[in-house]
DNA sequence: CCCGGACATGTCCATGTTGACATGTCGTCG
DNA sequence: CGACGACATGTCAACATGGACATGTCCGGG
């Protein structure tokens, strides 16, 4: 049921077409939070329209339909954001792999953790300059660029995983290539 | 397709029945990594058995079937663990909410972030003593208890989210209850 | 000895999701 | 002016999933 809320949330910062929303899911939201292809987005927008949560604000060239939130839609988004259920839905392949590291032979585990650490380090190198550039352009007092919080979240996530991988290597007792007694 | 790998990974540290595996999913793996109920687990075990990745090692009381990994199963688990696809499957309601914080009115966003920070702080309070107790019991040199790495991951995750929520409150300019000029 | 709760396995259906198929338009570059 | 790539929307079949339904067993306490 969360696809609907993802769409409501994306529409909250301005009207968009199904195509625009599809591209949004190609970005970090699809990478870290929730995946969706156009084949689910178009029918869901239609259902949301039926439910009165969005309206077709404008019909443009090539059949483009620009959707906008209604009051009901905004209300439903707010309700969902502020009302967290006890158990939320999670399905994350990456985290699953981390839970299962200990099912590997120590040698494989070491290689995997080293790979994770390297990958995180690379992503951090990649993300940090983007965030810093965004902050440099930003006038204090202005609203933050949409996605700035999400970007920071991603960065801190990578830092946490990086730290975890290094800690795990040490705890597995295979991280001392320089050799200790 | 990852349910299969979750089951293979759980079976890697010892034979278990469908019932045992169901209970494993009630724990932290189901909370942070991958959810599954018994209605999916039993059929999946049957299919895995057909595929030769597991075998019924023992049939006990009450129709209990204890499954064990085969060589093929272990091989498939290893393949999956070491071979990461470019795009992994993610669907996380909590992260989605974090991505959409900026779609709320500033006042709602503040309340939400404060709630997140408080929740994380509570979970950290809860988890840290468990980890410390486990470490105190642990003899250096022995293999780590299964799940120790996962627990550490959860702890660091909460710490990261906690830090992010506080940072976000500050960046939104609503975090100075003591008042600055 | 009987009852309740934990143990234990399964099926079924409505809904959610993925990937392939299908169709057509607009703008631009050669 | 023709081809190509990006824009744009949709459907459908196969598969995954979650929750309800269904069934039966073992064990300990009253």
Image (cartoon, coloured by chain):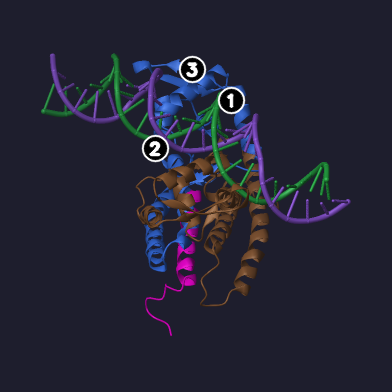
Chain colours: A brown, B blue, C purple, D green
The chain that hosts pointer 2 is B
Q: Which residue does the image show at 49% across and 71% down from the upper left?
A: B171
Q: Is residue B126 left or right of residue B80?
A: left
For disc 1, the neighbor class at 10 Å (few under 14, some 14 to 19, many from 20) is: many
Residue stretch rendered in magenta on the structure: B152-181
The circle on residue B26 is 2
For disc 3, the neighbor class at 10 Å (few under 14, some 14 to 19, many from 20) is: some
Instruction: Look at the magenta stretch and give its main secondary structure.
Output: helix
Q: How many numbered callouts? A: 3
Give the mark nearest the N terminus, 2 or 3. Answer: 2
CB within 8 Å, label 3 to label 1: no
Which residue is more in the foreground, C30 or B56? C30
Residue hosting label 1: B73
Residue hosting label 3: B56
Q: CA distance from mark 3 to mark 1?
A: 13 Å
Residue B118 in the image: above or below residue B140: below
Q: Is residue D14 left or right of residue D28?
A: right
Q: Are marks 2 and 3 on the same chain?
A: yes
Mark 2 or mark 3: which is in front?
2
**Residue B144 locus on image (x, y percent):** 51, 42
Mark 3, secondary structure of its residue: strand
CB within 8 Å, label 2 to label 3: no
Q: Is residue B158 magenta?
A: yes
For disc 2, the neighbor class at 10 Å (few under 14, some 14 to 19, many from 20) is: some
Q: CA distance from mark 2 to mark 1?
A: 23 Å
Q: Which residue does the image show at 66% across and 65% down from the upper left?
A: A129
């Amino acid at each position: 049921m969360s696809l609907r809320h993802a769409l409501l949330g994306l529409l909250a910062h301005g009207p968009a077409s199904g195509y625009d929303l599809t591209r949004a899911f190609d970005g970090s939201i699809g990478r870290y939070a929730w995946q969706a292809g156009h084949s689910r987005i178009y029918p869901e927008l239609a259902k949301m329209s039926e439910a009165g949560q969005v309206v077709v604000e404008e019909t443009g060239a090539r059949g483009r339909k620009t959707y906008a939130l209604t009051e009901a839609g905004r209300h439903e988004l707010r309700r969902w954001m502020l009302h967290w259920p006890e158990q939320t839905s999670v399905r994350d392949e990456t985290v699953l792999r981390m839970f299962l590291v200990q099912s590997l032979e120590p040698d494989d585990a070491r290689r995997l953790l080293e790979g994770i650490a390297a990958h995180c380090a690379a992503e951090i190198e990649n993300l940090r300059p983007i965030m810093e550039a965004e902050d440099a352009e930003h006038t204090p007092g202005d609203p933050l660029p949409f996605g700035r919080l999400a970007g920071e979240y991603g960065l801190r996530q990578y830092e946490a995983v990086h730290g975890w991988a290094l800690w795990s290597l040490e705890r597995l007792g295979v991280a001392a290539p320089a050799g200790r007694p």
